[in-house]
Amino acid sequence: MKNKRTILYVDDEEINLMLFEINFKEKYHVIGTDSPLKGLQILKDNHEISVVISDMRMPEMNGIQFIKKAKKKFPKICYFILTGYDITDEIAEALNNKLINFYFKKPFNMKEIDTSIQKVFS
């Protein structure tokens, strides 16, 4: 059986973490955390992670700030933002500068996320 790709999903809302894992656990190995700071530690400890999906608005730092820190240390990982709001200038700039591969709107669309991940690795 083919190995599953490992995704780190960062979201400060527990219900979103649970829903993401339920929806994607068949196809991907999902590691979820409610904290960007914990997310940085998880990246350090789990070298098999190839995709990071982060919520945009979180208490410790926003998703773009988290991804900037993560990408400095782990540049080969593909990064995505998930937001409940319209695209912001900050997200548009992150896309233009190739900090993130894509952004998704909440509520998340499983097929859109899966298709975007597949495109990155095809």
Image (cartoon, rainbow, N blue to C red):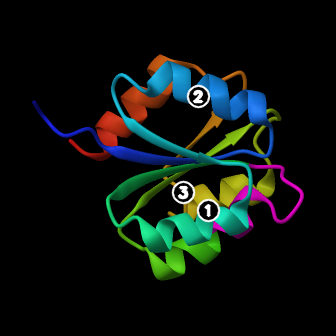
Amino acid, disc 2 = Phe
User: Which element is circle 3 on?
Assistant: loop
| Residue 69 lies in the magenta stretch | no
Amino acid, disc 3 = Ile
Q: Which residue is mark 3?
A: 100
- Write the residue at 45% across / 25% down: 24
Residue 32 x, y percent position in the rendering = 59, 45
The quadrant where residue 105 appears: top right
Kindly identify which numbered label has been placed on residue 3: none
Neighbourhood count class around disc 2 (C-alpha, 10 Å): few under 14, some 14–19, many 20 upward: some
Left or right of 92 in this view: 117? left
Q: Is residue 120 above or below residue 50?
A: above
Q: Depth-wise, is mark 3 or mark 1 nearer the camera?
A: 1
| Residue 58 lies in the magenta stretch | yes
Q: Is residue 105 visible?
A: no
Q: Is residue 27 above or below residue 71?
A: above
Give yes or no for contact between labels 2 and 1 (Cβ–Cβ under 8 Å). Answer: no
Q: Which residues are magenta?
A: 56-67
